[in-house]
């Protein structure tokens, strides 16, 4: 069995040299189902700006032979944009209590090697170490079950997320626009998944 990639953590200002790598992986992995994202450098710069500004952001990178083959991100929700905060405010949940997980993207050849679990472990550990968050959360795009573009035999991540203790919060949905191949800019619904963050005794 091939050895697992090296996992490296970068916090706050340490993430800045890695912004281009994360943008590259996002544009590569999210082009596939279910995001169907047509990569755009300007969009990536604007999206990742919140992480670059936050003193408590985190990049967890999977590296092999000097190449970044997977990336996962997080930051305090209070440091993210208003669009990501709105579903929590609408539910009366203080944004200061939430550590938000951004993407987890891994190149296809490196999947199934435990990287996904490592990404969650390290982000949850980072959030716990900051000592002020009650929950961790992320959002995932909603696609109709009968969407003709869904690949045959596609398996989503819902079972994995459920086993990690995350629960989908119906009604906590945000709207986010991005370019789809052949369709231009499309508005997409993304629903949040939450998990209580156990504190260190």
Image (tube, helix red, strand yellow):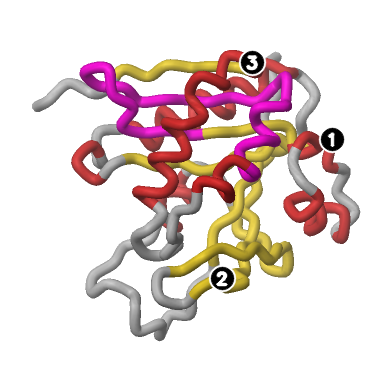
Judged by depth in the image, the label closer to the viewer, 3 or 2, is 2
Residue that badge 1 annotates? 96
| Foreground of the two, 26 or 130 | 26
Q: Which quadrant holds the C terminus? A: top right
* Gap in angstroms between the C-alphas marked 1 and 3: 21 Å
Q: Is residue 189 magenta?
A: no
Q: Which residues are magenta?
A: 46-72
Identify the mark nearer the N-term, 1 or 2.
1
Q: Quadrant of residue 51?
A: top right
Label 3: state its secondary structure: helix
Q: Is residue 187 above or below residue 7?
A: below
| Foreground of the two, 152 or 15 | 15
Task: State left or right for residue 170 relative to residue 36.
Answer: right
Judged by depth in the image, the label closer to the viewer, 1 or 2, is 2
Label 1: state its secondary structure: helix
Residue that badge 3 annotates? 13
Q: Is residue 56 magenta?
A: yes
Residue that badge 2 annotates? 185
């Amino acid at each position: 069995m091939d050895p697992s990639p090296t996992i490296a953590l970068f916090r706050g200002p340490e993430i800045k040299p890695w912004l281009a790598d994360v943008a590259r992986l996002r544009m590569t992995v999210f082009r596939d189902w279910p995001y169907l994202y047509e990569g755009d450098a300007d969009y990536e710069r604007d999206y990742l700006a919140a992480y670059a500004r936050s003193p408590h952001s985190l990049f967890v990178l999977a590296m092999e032979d000097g190449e970044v083959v997977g990336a996962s991100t997080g930051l305090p929700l209070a440091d993210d944009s208003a669009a990501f905060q709105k579903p929590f405010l609408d539910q009366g949940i203080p944004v200061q209590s939430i550590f938000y997980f951004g993407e987890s993207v891994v190149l296809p050849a490196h999947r199934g090697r435990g990287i996904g679990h490592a990404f969650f472990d390290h982000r949850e550990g980072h959030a716990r170490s900051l000592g002020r968050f009650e929950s961790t959360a992320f959002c995932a795009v909603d696609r109709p079950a009968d969407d003709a573009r869904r690949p045959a035999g596609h398996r989503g991540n819902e079972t994995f997320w459920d086993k990690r203790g995350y629960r989908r919060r119906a009604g906590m949905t945000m709207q986010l626009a991005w370019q789809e191949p052949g369709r231009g800019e499309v508005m997409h619904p993304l629903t949040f998944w939450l998990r209580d963050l156990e504190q260190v005794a």
